[in-house]
Amino acid sequence: MSLFTKLSGAASGVAMLLSATVAQADVLFWSTQAKPVEEAQAMRENVLASAGEVDYQPNDGGPWLTRLNAELQAGSGTIGVLGALHGDFSAMNADDLVDLDGLGMSASDTFNNLAKLGTDNLQYIPWMQASYIMAANKEALQYLPDGADINALTYDQLIAWAGNVMEATGEAKFGFPAGPKGLKHRFFQGYLYPSYTNGVVRTFASDEAVTAWEKMRELWAVTNPASTNFSFLQEQLLSGDAWIVFDHTSRLAQAFNERPDDFVAFPAPAGPTGRGFMPVLAGVGIPRTAPDMDAAKALVQHMLKPETQIATLRATNFFPVVDVELPGDLPPAVKAAGDAVAKMSGSADANPGLLPAGLGDKGGEFSQLYTETFERIVLAGQDIRMVLDDHKPRLQAIMDASGAPCWAPDAASDGPCPVE
């Protein structure tokens, strides 16, 4: 029986809950993702083509939330399935979402736990992911420390590896995006701090944070000093100015697409509190006001099918969250990065440092504080404890002004996240 037939036989009350502009057979997929025209069209024509009658409607966050809240307050609505980032779901009340246990889950236990939103049940199901990864020129592999597994490196091994390359070549060839347009703040927020402090806000000025910045100094000592001008590390990989780098997958793509046989992608390193990494995690959920629960659940299950996950990758450049074998006709950068992202998010010690959420217009100030901390400690050589204590009240002021509660890996908070 087709989804259309099932929907046509649904309770007569469904018709009263559907907007006049949405056909009765449609499941309204209300999403903050895949908004560009070409991505939305690919979603409709390729990703959702075999899912039955689906009305895919992407929106900016404001309109998305306004309509959703209106339907939740009214107690009825037309939205069948929600597509959004983890931060969007975490800002909702758990009782506004339908428990989705039994419909499927991602290959990452870490993501599945995040999707419970602090409850005992899946409140959304992970749908797709993007992230930041490591990449290296294969020339550097001969200098890996003895016993090191490139897919399970520690920070100490990464520092030793970069040191070995520097000793052998006479040049510092670790590349870091410390330039004006580089994404260095995401490294501190999503990688260094979670790996050493198991937090990012609460633990900002902790003793463990002092250790983290000490390690960052060690890494910087074997980093190409021109990194203060590096913003897209694909350029330094291609030029040979860097042999080992960290950056967002999209900022490494050119290197892999131009010379796929010369480079390797791999997960970020681990520290004492896990393998910190920053997933851009999107999920699918069902609001309690969905007009046809069976049809909505069928669509959620469709989004997790391996073939759907690959179609989503082609449409959005977001990577699968389930185990899939990537087809051979994907661009080299997609295959390389997808493998590294899957290994990173699926690792036993994965410790995601999520994108900051709830900061509003304080988001830029929040990230700038971490950048200034790096500049003072690592570039200017100032005392670590002094800098952290100096910046601590500024960070607390940002959290208080925004009212943002803590996000993973920090423990949840009632009210603004405290800087402890």
Image (cartoon, helix red, strand yellow):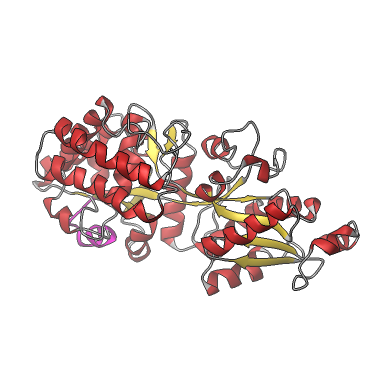
Using residue 75 as the reference point, say whether residue 316 is left or right of it.
left
Residue at the image point whose x is 36% and y is 46% from the top = 401
Q: Position of residue 56 (x, y in %)?
A: 66, 66
Q: How many marks?
A: 0
Camera-side residue: 190 or 316?
190
Q: Position of residue 278 (x, y in %)?
A: 40, 45
Question: Can residue 307 be seen at all in this image of the molecule?
Answer: no
Res 11 quadrant in image: bottom right
Residue at the image point whose x is 82% and y is 67% from the top = 24
Res 154 quadrant in image: top left
Which quadrant: the N terminus?
bottom right
Q: Position of residue 204 (x, y in %)?
A: 29, 34
Camera-side residue: 204 or 219?
204
- Indicate whether residue 261 is drawn in magenta: no
Q: Position of residue 10 (x, y in %)?
A: 88, 57
In the rendered image, the vertical position of residue 108 relative to residue 128, given as above or below: above
Which quadrant: the C terminus?
top left
Using residue 316 as the reference point, say whether residue 278 is left or right of it.
left
Res 352 quadrant in image: top left
Camera-side residue: 302 or 140?
302
> Where does the magenta region start and end?
233-243
Using residue 310 as the reference point, say whether residue 251 is left or right of it.
left
Question: Can residue 330 be seen at all in this image of the molecule?
Answer: yes
Residue at the image point whose x is 50% and y is 57% from the top = 318
